[in-house]
Image: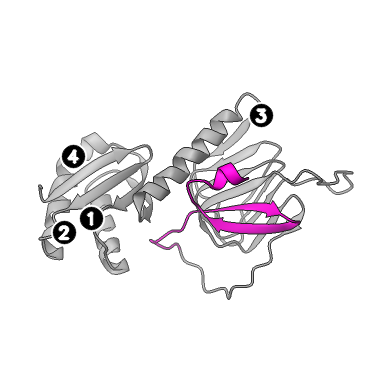
Amino acid sequence: MSDIKVKGYPNGIIISYNQSLTFDEMVEVTKEKFASSRKFFGKNTVCIIFDNISFTDEQEDILCQIIKDNTDLDILCVYHENGEKIGLFNECIRLVNDEKDKSDIYFIKESIINEGFVKSSKDIVIIGDVYPGATVVSEKNVYIFGGLYGTCMAGYRNEGATETYSDRTSIVTSCDMAPEKLLIDGIEYENDKKTSKWGIKPKLVPAVAFVKDNKVIIENYSKDIFDRL
């Protein structure tokens, strides 16, 4: 194979290397490849997948910085095990498209940072992260193409509403599920894991949150998860 192969997919780039190369050689071929293709990639926000090789966090940071320095791309995150991750994007997009005739969608094409607050009666789709301290509230579903590190409420009803929540169908999806606070259809997620200091991580684990047996459940994304909801 060639020293480096770059393949595009919707909202992302898959990069494969000749595994006989040293890391320093990979750095050089990455710089040459992306510098020569700067106009081709244009100004887009993308996710990166290193397809056939494992890097340390430091090595991934170096390669991503090289890509940013030699293109006009904005790198949202780095994925692993590409089939599962691409599947999440495609499935979420399909679900959103299926709902277009039934409800409007509120698109946000940036991260929600600091103490940002977003509220809508529509499905909310965020192309970015929800930072600690930020809050997203939807009467319907929330699809986050990035990390959820702040507060998210889906299936939200105003105080005093007579909604009984007998049909708990709202969901929240994100590419990294580590919320400060998460409520779906009035039920708060009980996190029994120890929290650590937040930071946007290069290794993301896509997840879906939903209500089951009057409890919010978070499961890592799998190919059949939406069929089971």
> Which residue was labeled with disc 3?
103
CA separation, marks 4 and 1? 13 Å
CA separation, marks 2 and 4? 16 Å
> Which residue was labeled with disc 4?
37
In the image, is 54 to the left or to the right of 183?
left
Q: Quadrant of residue 23?
A: bottom left
Specify the quadrant that holds the C terminus: top right
> How far across and how far down the image is residue 113, in percent?
55, 55
Q: Amino acid at mark 3?
A: Ser
Q: Residue at x 12, y 49 (%)?
A: 32
Q: Nearer the viewer, residue 211 or 66?
A: 211
> Which residue was labeled with disc 2?
27
Q: Is residue 203 above or below residue 40?
A: below
Q: Nearer the viewer, residue 29 or 113?
A: 29
Q: Residue at x 28, y 36 (%)?
A: 42
- Asked whether the beta carbons under mark 1 and mark 2 sit within 8 Å of each other, the answer is yes
- Asked whether the beta carbons under mark 2 and mark 3 sit within 8 Å of each other, the answer is no
